[in-house]
Image (cartoon, grey):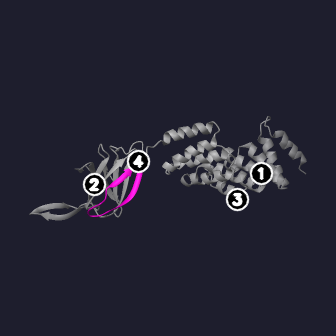
């Protein structure tokens, strides 16, 4: 919405304009120059009253009620009185979007058709928002290994606050811990819809896709990871090793080519790529990578003996 003007009207609640400074028509008043103020686009003869109450029926005081006239996307706000009642005047007939915001309650929204007169009262019932408590409970259950119970608490939060898309990530983690990768993927995709470039989400989605043997899908997730945003080769290296171990050496090499271009000084990457080349019977390429690994690796590198064995076996 636009900035709040200082003009307010008094009714059962205080109503303040939320429209931008109105345009002025040029004209003359008497013998001198003057300006005529145009009324806001939402202004008319309609009136709307209502009450905001909690689940027990008690009025919610000081709730912010926003009224937006849909055709012009402008409007005003009101605050409820101590009994939860509000009143809005001078509303143009037509479609209005009404939104109610109050501390400790989820936001309430509804489209209302306003007539020039005889509008029925709007009844708003809010339910207390216990999302912080639910999230704390869910986190405790997750840490205790009670993944199904944690998921149920996260689901309650998501039902009350669908805008909290990060909850999809937490739900995906619970499924992942249960090794239900098909369900984990559903919620990872929902989380990625809001954070499409999150490297952790993309890595987890790729890992889950590999678990269900959907390797083209896994490669799709990995392709979306921004190499330049990575601080270390670990994310893509782990994915490449998983692909190689799953018999997808060519896919593993595709990933390793990327990560080596980003981190050319990481010795282990050449070992992994060399091993993958050998699995594809590409001895020359495998030998070149393994020799590079041996030349770069420190003397106590865990994979150094294995690299030397492989090189000795290459014809």
Please report contact status of discs 2 and 4: CB closer than 8 Å, yes or no.
Answer: no
Q: Residue 216 got which mark?
A: 3
Spatial distance from mark 2 to mark 1, Cα to Cα?
66 Å
- Say which element carries label 4: loop
Which residue, given by chain and number where applicable, does mark 2 sit on? 88
Please tell me whether mark 3 or mark 1 is closer to you in this view.
3
Determine whether label 2 and label 3 are within 8 Å by CB. no
Camera-side mark, 2 or 1: 2
Q: How far apart in space, not on screen, are marks 4 and 1 (Cα)?
A: 54 Å
Magenta stretch bounds: 106-124
Q: Residue 99 carries which label?
A: none
Q: Residue beneath label 4, please?
A: 126
**Mark 2 neighbour class, 10 Å CA radius: few under 14, some 14 to 19, many 20 or more:** many
Residue extending furthest left?
A: 31
Mark 2 or mark 1, earlier in chain: 2
Q: In this view, does 221 lie to the left or right of 298?
A: left
**Residue 294, above or below 100:** above
Q: Residue 244 carries which label?
A: 1
- Element under label 3? helix
- Dot 4, crowdedness within 10 Å: few (<14), some or many (≥20)? many
């Amino acid at each position: 919405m636009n900035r709040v003007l200082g003009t307010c009207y008094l009714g059962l609640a205080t109503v303040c304009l939320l429209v931008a400074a109105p345009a002025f028509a040029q004209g003359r008043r008497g013998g001198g120059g003057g300006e005529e103020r145009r009324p806001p686009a939402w202004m008319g003869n309609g009136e709307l009253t209502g009450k905001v109450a909690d689940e027990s029926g008690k009025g919610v005081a000081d709730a912010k009620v926003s009224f937006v006239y849909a055709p012009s996307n402008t409007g005003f706000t009101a605050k409820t009185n101590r009994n939860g009642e509000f009143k809005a005047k001078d509303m143009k007939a037509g479609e209005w979007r009404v939104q109610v915001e109050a501390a400790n309650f989820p936001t309430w929204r509804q489209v209302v058709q306003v007539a020039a007169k005889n509008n029925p009262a709007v009844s708003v019932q809010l339910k207390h928002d216990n999302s912080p408590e639910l999230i704390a409970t869910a986190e405790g259950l997750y840490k205790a290994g009670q993944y199904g119970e944690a998921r149920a608490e996260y689901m309650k939060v998501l039902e009350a606050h669908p805008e909290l898309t990060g909850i999809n990530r937490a739900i995906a983690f619970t499924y992942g811990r249960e090794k239900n990768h098909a369900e984990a993927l559903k919620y990872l995709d929902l989380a990625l819809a809001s954070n499409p470039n999150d490297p952790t989400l993309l890595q987890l989605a790729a890992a889950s896709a590999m678990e269900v043997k959907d390797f083209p899908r896994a490669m799709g997730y990995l392709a979306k990871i921004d190499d330049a945003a990575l601080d270390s080769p670990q994310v893509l290296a782990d994915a490449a090793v998983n692909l190689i171990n799953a018999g997808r050496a060519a896919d593993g090499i595709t990933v390793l080519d990327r990560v080596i271009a980003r981190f050319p000084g990481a010795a282990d990457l050449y070992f992994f790529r060399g091993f993958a080349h050998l699995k594809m019977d590409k001895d020359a390429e495998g030998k070149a990578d393994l020799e590079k690994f041996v030349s770069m690796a420190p003397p106590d590198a865990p994979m150094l003996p294995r690299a030397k064995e492989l090189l000795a076996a290459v014809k």
